[in-house]
Amino acid sequence: MSFAQRANFYDTHCLRCRHTVYQVDRVGPLKDFTFFHSQCFKCAVCGTKLTLKNYYNNQNSQVDKEVYCQSHVPKITPGQIDGNAVGIRTALSVPKSQTYVNEQIRAGGRANIDNEAMLIKSVLNTSTSHPPPSNGHSTSNHSDYKYGRYDASALHIQHALKQTVLQKGYKREAKPITEYLDKAEQEELERIHREEEDRLYQKFASQREQEDKRLKEEFKEEWEKELEKLTAKFEKDMSKRRSKDDVKVLTVKHLKEKEEFEKNMTIKREKKKESVTRKLLEHERAATAALVDKQSKEMMSLINERKIEHMMTQLGDEREEDVPELHEYPAQPPPPSPATVGKIEIYDDPEVFSEVDQLAIQVAQEDQKTFTDLIRQLLGNYASDVEKARTIFRWITVKNLNQMNFEDGVRTDTPMGLLRGIKYGTESYHVLFKRLCSYAGLHCVVIKGYSKSAGYQPGVKFEDNRFRNSWNAVYVAGAWRFVQCNWGARHLVNAKEVPKPGNKNKSDSLRYEYDDHYFLTDSKEFIYEFFPLQPEWQLLRHPITLQEFEELPFVRSLFFRYGLCFPDEDTKAVMHTDSTGAATIRIGMPTHMQSSLIFHYNLKFYDNDGDTYEGVSLKRFVMQSVVGNMVAFRVHAPTSGALLLDIFANAVTPREYLTGEPMKFKSVCKFKIVCRDLQTVMVPLPDCASGEWGPMKANRLFGLIPVTHPDALIFCNRELEVQFRMSRPLTDFMATLHRNGTEEKRLGKYVSHSVSGELVTVRITFPEEGQYGMDVYTREVQRGEHESNEKHLLTHCCKYLINSSKKN
């Protein structure tokens, strides 16, 4: 296979399962152009889930392209340099001309410490009392030194280096903006910008006044012409009539026509006014965005100039190009390109921002008259670009700008005047985020495109402007990363109303909800909901088309928060049934979430929202089951047409589930199920409790282990015994039997249960052949229960689908 053929094959196929790898679920390229599905990216020996931070390749073999965990990667024997370690051999032969840095590591000969060389910089900054030996040679005094022993062809090390670089870049102590930019100078530039805005808003007001005047004159003229025609017609008809009755009839008719005319003209005028206002607002938004873009560049230029001046003053005669710190953050916005590492490599828990978030919440409850004041309050002593972006994001999500009350005639030099663009609708969350980023010295852009937003359903085509949207990309942690402030904003909880600005009587118990998914969202996840008009701003190595975007499954942020995935590569937004009317949706769960995730679903007709068919709930035409780390929803369409399957999830502890309290489920994904030609009559499932089928639920939440029947579907004769083993104390078991067309009370005498030690046995004698459903209920033994009369209600444990026949 040629080099080009090999690259082409591995660009589209997973090394592990050999199925097609799509860009939104791709890990790689790794060793020799290899790729993996994210769910296939596991150790070849033990199956441990891997990431780009902790995977290893076999350095003993160029042929072995598999990935391993640290415990199972084949080790290079002591003193061995294999044929692939050319970089090591070269490093060993380098003369000892430099004490710390091997100049031949980088292209161009001369050592260059750029903004990505934080690992080397950390070595430079270590204590000089124990300098590492040059060129990777160990000495008796430094036998534990390991730098320089591996070359850049060892991809697992290369990725580890990048993670170290990023973490050091994030945690590095940098200088806050207050140290090199005078507040008065920033305020002066803001004052100039505010005057420009004043002139722009005056222009907007003048244009609106002119349009309003033009519309009034236009409708007045049209009104008079149409009224003149109506009057002339009435007079003409009157001239032909002589009797009093005719005159009376004509007069009444004329009055009705005049009334109808006035009503229609009023509606027409309001529609015309609405259309003109909408066009003016679009123009004003574009003009405001253009002005903010210009002003943001000017603010960034000021910040960069003062930063360089400050550094050069401190460094004296050293040349600017010799000082790497001056270039840690790019002076000019880099071109759009995919990030080399994901969000989880920057932070894996929002709690790392607890102090930053709390500061943003505090500042949001106070008043500021200038953006300079606002930013300096928000940033505090934070100098990291990630922390800067975070505090701005959290301030906007907390501020709840859509519900702020603006008084008429508000002055521009007041706290509310600061956000007048929000009041007039000319400035969006995204433009405001871009503006504030420039005050903090961050590159930011506003991206326009389509989104699967409110009102969107799977299968809808993006043929008009209904689902147009805007969002941001901010340059932090060495790459462009997505931010969606509008979707990240959430309401205030545990409070009757949002505290008013300046209110000093704030409660410490208030908690602000937001969606962390929309801060620095990975491009492979962002593309499921947002499609930019410019392909390069997909920030994907292989951009997709609009049609492919439409075909992607319709998912919500919770899908990614729970770490879910689609293991079947043919899972699309629109799923077509087979000849029996069946279609299956499979969702993969991460190992650490299997014990806590509870799924639910809703099925209704796609076009009319009806959720019943011939009096039967459509939910009974879906079989939800869990096997291992996979939850499956098998839909059997009762009739030809289109259905909408909405899948919900919630993460709960077994204790929360056992209390019997109502659980709130949130949508994680939706699918359109299309059945073109139904050739089989499908009967509904027995009317059991809602939720998944099979004993996995009993095992996860109750510690009730299935002994005899581990699957959801059972085939048996007229008698059946189902046994479980208790791994913790349970009591008060109950089993109920269900069958279509038969009352539950009539079936009660055919099912019983017994408990012997840890063994629970359910016995069924079926009255006749057919399909049955069996529900099992129980509850845990509570501490002190024997001394108290209070008991928790029985909780649904699991259910089985049973086919009874004489032949089995």
Image: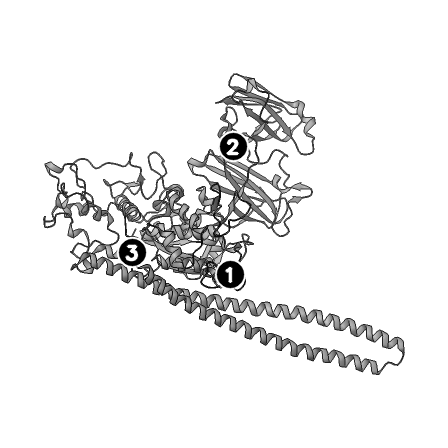
Q: Name the mark on residue 329.
A: 3
Is there a contact, CB below 8 Å, between mark 2 and mark 1?
Answer: no
Q: What residue type is labelled 3?
A: Tyr
Instruction: Say left or right for 693 vs 396.
Output: right
Which quadrant of the rendered structure holds the C terminus?
top right
Is there a contact, CB below 8 Å, between mark 1 and mark 3?
Answer: no
Distance between the Cα atoms at labels 1 and 3?
34 Å
> Residue 731: x, y in percent?
56, 21
Foreground: disc 2 or disc 1: 1
For mark 1, give the secondary structure.
helix
Mark 1 — residue? Answer: 423
Mark 1 surroundings: few (<14), some (14-19) or many (≥20) residues within 10 A: many
677 lies above or below 254? above
Residue shown at the point (63%, 68%) measured from the top left: 270
Residue 97 seen from this side: yes
Q: Foreground residue, 326 or 747?
A: 326
Instruction: Say left or right for 83 vs 773.
Output: left
Q: Which amino acid does label 2 sit on?
A: Glu
Residue shown at the point (41%, 64%) measured from the top left: 292
Foreground: disc 1 or disc 3: 1
Mark 2 — residue? Answer: 656
Looking at the image, is mark 2 or mark 1 earlier in the sequence?
Answer: 1
For mark 2, give the secondary structure.
helix
Name the residue furthest top: 756
Q: Name the mark on residue 602.
A: none
Distance between the Cα atoms at labels 3 and 2?
47 Å
Snapshot quadrant of residue 601: top right
> Residue 669: x, y in percent?
51, 46
> Residue 211: x, y in percent?
56, 74
Looking at the image, is mark 1 or mark 3 earlier in the sequence?
Answer: 3
For mark 3, give the secondary structure.
loop
